Image: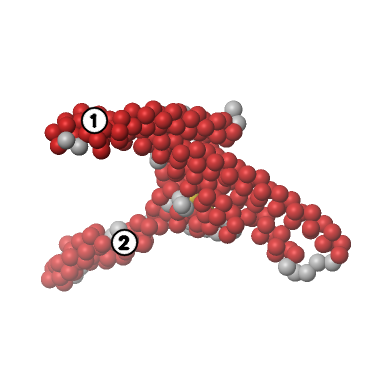
């Protein structure tokens, strides 16, 4: 199951960044924001801390205020240190901090347009997983790849369904958690009279989302029937294409009485499977119509 479900309206490049930045998104969800950017980074401070004294002492030696030997010693010792700092200036911590800052600046505008699976309670996470399995069964099927289904509309409608289900489940999970927290403190009869109808409203909302998920599962089931018929149809066609080879072998071996009836049934099986494929594809299209709001 995908860790992040994204509003299909998010531009593709930003959507990909959202998928690749789950850890940063999780921190942002907890209220994290990067510290204001410093005028000079820590690596520059380290470099200046070494370069400054070396340049200063070297300058004094150059104007004769210190012995040339001392000045040269500072310079010779300082050069390797400067090289080491340049080589190690980009420390992993600095790179990670800068990367997270850039991600934050790009993605903070998309709050509310993505759902992390961690946002969902256990019941909601199970429902989302069911929806995603059904969607994957459709999009990964051969009948969809071959265009026997409305693959173009599937590519638009199914992500929209996934997003809407995830969005509703995230709201349901958040409100359900707050409701449970409130009533767990103990309620008076007056509060209970209000809390119970609200709890039923939460249950009704979950049932409505469940109906969406079940509609997706029915569509996936119809597609699975079409997939089986499609595979069987192609297998029969392959066998039928080799019938003359079987007939030659049967004639040469004298096995006519045994094999001929089986060979004759191939044509009948192929016709039945073709009809089954058409029926199952038609059923899938009908199931699709119940999903498609347009």
Q: Is residue 182 left or right of residue 88?
A: right
Image coordinates of residue 78 in percent, x first then y, are: 20, 66
The answer to whether one can see residue 61 in this image is no
Give above or below for 175 relative to 260. Answer: below
Q: Which image quarter is the C terminus in? A: top right
Q: Is residue 162 left or right of residue 93?
A: right
Image coordinates of residue 74 in percent, x first then y, are: 18, 69
Q: Residue at the spot x=59%, y=33% of the render?
A: 290
Name the residue furthest front: 257
Image coordinates of residue 201 in percent, x first then y, are: 74, 51
Q: CA distance from mark 1 to mark 2?
A: 70 Å
Which residue bears the numbered disc 1?
Answer: 243
The answer to whether one can see residue 227 in this image is yes
The residue lying toward the viewer, choosing from 91 and 64, is: 91
| Quarter-of-image position of residue 138 | top left
Secondary structure beneath label 1: helix
Which residue bears the numbered disc 2?
Answer: 91
Crowdedness near tag 1: few (<14), some (14–19) or many (≥20) residues, C-alpha within 10 Å: some
Q: Nearer the viewer, mark 1 or mark 2?
A: 1
Give above or below for 34 relative to 246. Answer: below
- Pointer 1 with pointer 2, Cβ within 8 A: no
Q: Is residue 127 left or right of residue 95?
A: right
Question: Which is nearer the N-term, disc 1 or disc 2?
Answer: 2
The residue lying toward the viewer, choosing from 181 and 100, is: 181
């Amino acid at each position: 199951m995908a860790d992040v479900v994204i509003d299909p309206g998010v531009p593709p490049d930003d959507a990909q960044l959202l998928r690749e930045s789950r850890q940063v998104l999780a921190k942002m969800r907890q209220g994290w924001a990067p510290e204001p950017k410093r005028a000079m980074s820590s690596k520059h401070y380290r470099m200046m801390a070494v370069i400054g004294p070396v340049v200063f002492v070297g300058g004094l030696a150059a104007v004769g205020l210190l012995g040339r030997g001392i000045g040269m010693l500072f310079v010779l010792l300082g050069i390797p240190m400067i090289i080491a700092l340049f080589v190690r200036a980009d420390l992993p911590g600095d790179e990670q901090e800068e990367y997270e800052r850039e991600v934050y600046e790009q993605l903070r505008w998309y709050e509310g347009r993505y759902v992390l699976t961690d946002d969902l309670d256990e019941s909601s996470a199970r429902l989302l997983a069911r929806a995603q399995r059904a969607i994957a069964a459709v999009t990964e099927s051969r009948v969809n790849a071959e265009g026997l289904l409305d693959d173009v509309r599937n590519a638009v409608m199914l992500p929209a369904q996934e997003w809407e289900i995830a969005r509703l489940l995230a709201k349901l999970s958040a409100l359900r958690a707050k409701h449970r927290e409130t009533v767990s403190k103990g309620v008076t009869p007056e509060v209970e009279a209000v809390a119970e109808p609200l709890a039923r409203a939460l249950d009704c909302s979950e049932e409505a989302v469940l109906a969406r998920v079940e509609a997706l599962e029915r569509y996936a089931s119809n597609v699975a029937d079409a997939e089986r018929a499609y595979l069987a149809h192609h297998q029969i066609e392959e066998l039928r294409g080799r019938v003359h080879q079987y007939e030659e072998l049967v004639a040469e071996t004298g096995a006519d009485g045994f094999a001929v009836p089986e060979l004759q049934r191939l044509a009948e099986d192929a016709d039945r499977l073709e009809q089954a494929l058409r029926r199952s594809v038609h059923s899938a299209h009908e199931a699709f119509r119940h999903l498609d709001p347009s």
